[in-house]
Amino acid sequence: MARKTKAETNETILKLMDIARRHFTEYGYADTVLEQIVLEANLTRGAVYHHFRSKKELFRSVLESVQREVAQRIEQDASTSEDVWEQLYLGCRAFVMAAIEDSSKRIMLIDGPAILGWNVWREMDETHSMSLLRGQLQLMQEQGYLKDASVDAMTHFLSGALNEASLWLAHAEARPNALEEAMRTLALFLEGIRRQE
């Protein structure tokens, strides 16, 4: 039998991750059955284990993919403005909006930290969303827009607030004004770090 090309291998991996993401989203990590993913992907269990050693490793890859998508949304939304303050607000808002979408909230906010642990989850967050936040704050501090404070501390404070707000919103479906309240609070928080002319 001919060996698969790199493109075919990548296509198989993407197909597996796409199916897995739907299962992790719908059923959660605990109730996702690897055999169902194997069946839906029309592959053998051995073929799946060739790419991912376990369900946990498959989940980790899916979470990494979700984190990358969220970071792309942040960059995309922030780039719609030329104003650095609006870029910061739009980027923060994009993080929250992407994190609470059905296709990411369970994987990113609930199962991610629980299954992989906070250290792994935070490393991923730092690599993707938090690095964008740090870069924006660094730029703004260099240009004199921020009050005199550590960029590192501001990054962690703001990132922690965004993560906590996202978790709150993910469980606040019954509260009609929660998103509006969160965005108004975000704007107030950002105003608090602005250097006054």
Image (spheres, rainbow, N blue to C red):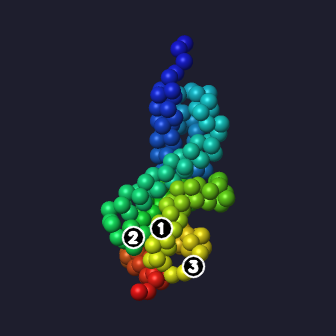
76 vs 59: above or below: below
- Residue at the image position 59 percent from the left and 70 percent from the top: 152
Residue 112 is marked as none
Asked whether 80 or 47 is in front, the reply is 80
| Residue 72 locus on image (x, y percent) | 43, 54
Q: CA distance from mark 3 to mark 1?
A: 13 Å
Say which quadrant the C terminus sits in. Answer: bottom left
Q: Which residue is mark 2?
A: 84
The secondary element bearing badge 2 is classed as helix
Q: Is residue 174 visible?
A: no
Q: Amino acid at mark 3?
A: Ala
Asked whether 87 or 163 is in front, the reply is 87
| Residue 112 locus on image (x, y percent) | 59, 55
- Residue at the image position 47 percent from the left and 36 percent from the top: 15
Q: Which one is earlier in the sequence, the residue at label 3 or at label 1?
A: 1
The secondary element bearing badge 1 is classed as helix
190 vs 12: above or below: below
Residue 149 is marked as 3
Q: Nearer the viewer, mark 1 or mark 2?
A: 1
Are the residues tagged 1 and 2 within 8 Å (C-beta)? yes
Q: Amino acid at mark 1?
A: Leu
Q: Which residue is mark 1?
A: 139
Q: Amino acid at mark 2?
A: Val
Q: Which one is earlier in the sequence, the residue at label 2 or at label 3?
A: 2
Identity of the residue furthest to the top in this view: 1
